[in-house]
Amino acid sequence: MADDTKALAQGLKRRDPGLLDQLIEQYQYRLFRYLLYLTSSRERAEDFFQETWIRVLERGHQYDGKYKFESWLFRIARNLVIDWQRSKKMLSLDALIDPEEGAPMEFAAKNQPSPLHLVLSAEEKSGIHASLDRVPGVYREVLVLRFQEELGLEEIAGVLAAPLSTVKSRLYRGLEALRGAMHGGAA
Amino acid sequence: MIDNLHARAEKLISQERVEGISQAEGDWLAEHLRQCESCSQIAKQTHEALRAFRGAAIALPRGLAERTRFRVQLRAQELREREPKRSLLWVICAISWALGIATAPYVWQAIQWIGERTGAPRLVLEFGFGLWWAIPALFAAAIVILENVRQANERDWSGR
């Protein structure tokens, strides 16, 4: 893996167009899914998806190959979303560490479907999507990284720029919230 | 005591998924789940919730990769056009050095003439003549350093 990531780092430093095309193809689903869960908006996820790859092109020389490429990619995507949220004077994801501190960003008024619910319902009429919008965004993010992206705890900590203890705490709470949401309990 | 057992079982059910548990803990949990209906139910719910979560699919917007590639290619072209013209810089330096060699006798005569007029020591005159040769290289080095400083000041997106 180390050789692969080193070769990747060199290709990114050279701004190898063939490599970028290949990476866009390879990571399109995973990156879009992550952004969709993060932003709760299909249009925004699409914008951030394109912006993320432009950042990869521009800042490719900063990837040193010591870590998995996808961790770096998700980190870039996350930073873009946070910058956008800050510029819009919205709550940052970091402010959502503890949902009790404020209203989670994408949740609609009671008895109305949330934006995420609307987005995901359009994707698939299944119980899981209906349940996911009851899981706070900050927990949903770590759940995606851990159980869909299958990143290690240290890698998630790298993506979030958060201590390992925070990642674990969010995962435990997220798992509880997901179980509760799926089985009719309070998230 | 019994509550503690259930709390431990519930903690291990989550821990197993989040950071893993030891063989001994796994054995204890398996035994507990065989005997405890409510904890077994929690384990089943956790398993089902994660299975559904992992299986949740989304549809990609049509043509997303193609649109992105197009934007990335445009940006790459812009960047190439804006890249520092290093080769041009070195060509200019080479021309400058060639002219320096060609004009060296005249420059030295001029410096000697200034030396005679001002009474400056020979060491100063030689240093001035050396500087005349070094100017293109110093200029090129200054450009390269400024460019590196600019790149270093860009936000580090690796965040490590």
Image (cartoon, grey):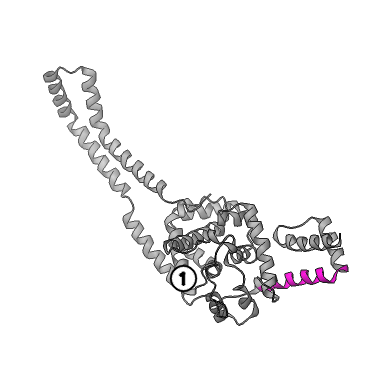
Q: Residues within 10 Å of mark 1 (few under 14, many from 20)?
A: some
**Span colored in magenta:** B35-52
Q: Position of residue A98 (x, y in %)?
A: 59, 61
Q: Nearer the viewer, residue B59 or A180?
A: A180
Q: Is residue B50 magenta?
A: yes
Residue at mark 1: chain: A
Per the picture, the main secondary structure of the magenta-coloured stretch is: helix
User: Which residue is drawn at the image coordinates 20% and 36% (left, top)?
Assistant: B99
Relative horizontal placement of residue B117, taking residue B90 as reference (left or right): left
Q: Position of residue A109 (x, y in %)?
A: 54, 76
In the displayed structure, would residue B140 be above or below residue B160? above
Q: Position of residue A145 (x, y in %)?
A: 61, 63
Determine which quarter of the picture holds residue A180. Answer: bottom right
Determine which quarter of the picture holds residue A83. Answer: bottom left
Which residue in the structure is indicated by mark 1? A44
In the displayed structure, would residue A98 be above or below residue B106? below
Q: Is residue A18 visible?
A: no
Residue type marked 1: Arg
Q: Quadrant of the N terminus of chain B?
A: bottom right
Relative horizontal placement of residue B36, taking residue B70 as reference (left or right): right
Q: Nearer the viewer, residue B82 or A52?
A: A52
